[in-house]
Image: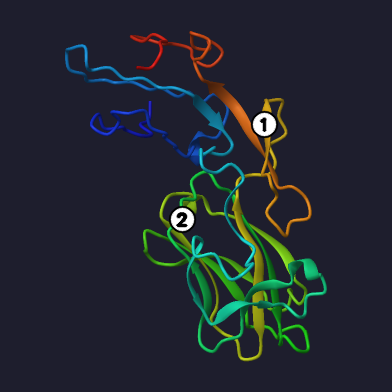
Amino acid sequence: WTLLQSFTSTSYRTASYIYIDVQNQMKFNGVQFRMTQAVRTTGSYDVWSIDTFTVHSTIQRPECTVACYHDNFYNGYSTSVWSTVTGGSVAPLTCNTNQQYSDGLYFDGSGTRSAVTGGLDLRGLYAINFRLQIIASNDDCNTASSGQEVTLLYSINSGVWIMFETFSSANYRLLTDVTVELPVNARQQNVALQIMQSNHPSSVWAIDNFGIYSPDTCPPTNYATVTVTMSPTPLPYPSPISSTVCNYYSDNFDAGSYKSTLWSTVTGVRVSLQP
């Protein structure tokens, strides 16, 4: 048995949500999980319990099922998502022929151009999706010359910035939908994201409809799935945003017993109502 997580006995007086990432070395057939308390004191107060145990493809946090963070830049940028915007502002994207996406976060300032989020809780989230445009200017709408890339970075606990995606300045003359998978190491608490351009002698750029999402598809299996749809749909999306959550294994213990199809051995425990 390999220890995955320990829970201190002084931190869980009330029932608490717990989320743990499945490590890469655990992602194969035949893996077992075990919860155990090896040392305990005598007395009736030294007891513990679990409820709603689930192993699935994305963490279903109570406050967030589909789009945990989203900004369509209507009436400015969202301060609940972005902490700092440098060299840019919300403005009409005049080179965009689709007026449904007429406003965006537009960067044309001197020096570093960047947008930095606050410390986000990215546990269980999977991908960043936004629209990106890099052009020579907002007047002629021509393709920007090479060497003026836009980069995407993350930082954990206000530490060093780590780049994980680069967008070539020659490929985004039109406002283009971009989806980038979050690095596994970034799927934790207090993670900041930054999208920036450090070299821009002859270009401007913009983003629109920025969002961070849970997976929108499940692996091809016969496991049960649950589809959730955000309602009302946040503008300016033309169709509802939905996410399919793959519930591989789950037990809420509501039947008065545990599922023998999930648990092979239960020792020193019983299913009962929580006090």
State which quarter of the image contains the C terminus: top left
Callout 2 environment at 10 Å: few (<14), some (14 to 19), or many (20+)?
A: many
Query: Which residue corresponds to the image point at 57% horizontal and 71% vertical from the top-left?
Result: 151
Residue where numbered disc 1 is placed: 226
Give the image location of residue 4, x and y in percent.
38, 34
Residue kind at label 2, given as amino acid type: Leu
Give the image location of residue 216, x and y in percent.
68, 44
- Farthest residue in the left direction? 42
Is residue 255 shown above or below 62? above
Cα separation, mark 2 vs mark 1, equals 25 Å
Q: Nearer the viewer, residue 159 or 132?
A: 132
State which quarter of the image contains the N terminus: top left
Is residue 240 shown above or below 28? below
Q: Contact, CB < 8 Å: mark 2 with mark 1? A: no
Give the image location of residue 192, x and y in percent.
46, 61
Callout 1 environment at 10 Å: few (<14), some (14 to 19), or many (20+)?
A: few
Classify mark 2: helix, strand or loop. Answer: loop
Classify mark 1: helix, strand or loop. Answer: strand
Residue where numbered disc 2 is placed: 120
What's the mark number on residue 57? none
The tag earlier along the polypeptide, 2 or 1, is 2
Is residue 225 shown above or below 82? above
Residue kind at label 1, given as amino acid type: Val
Residue 153 relative to residue 148: left or right: left
Residue 190 relative to residue 104: left or right: left
Is residue 213 shown above or below 25? below
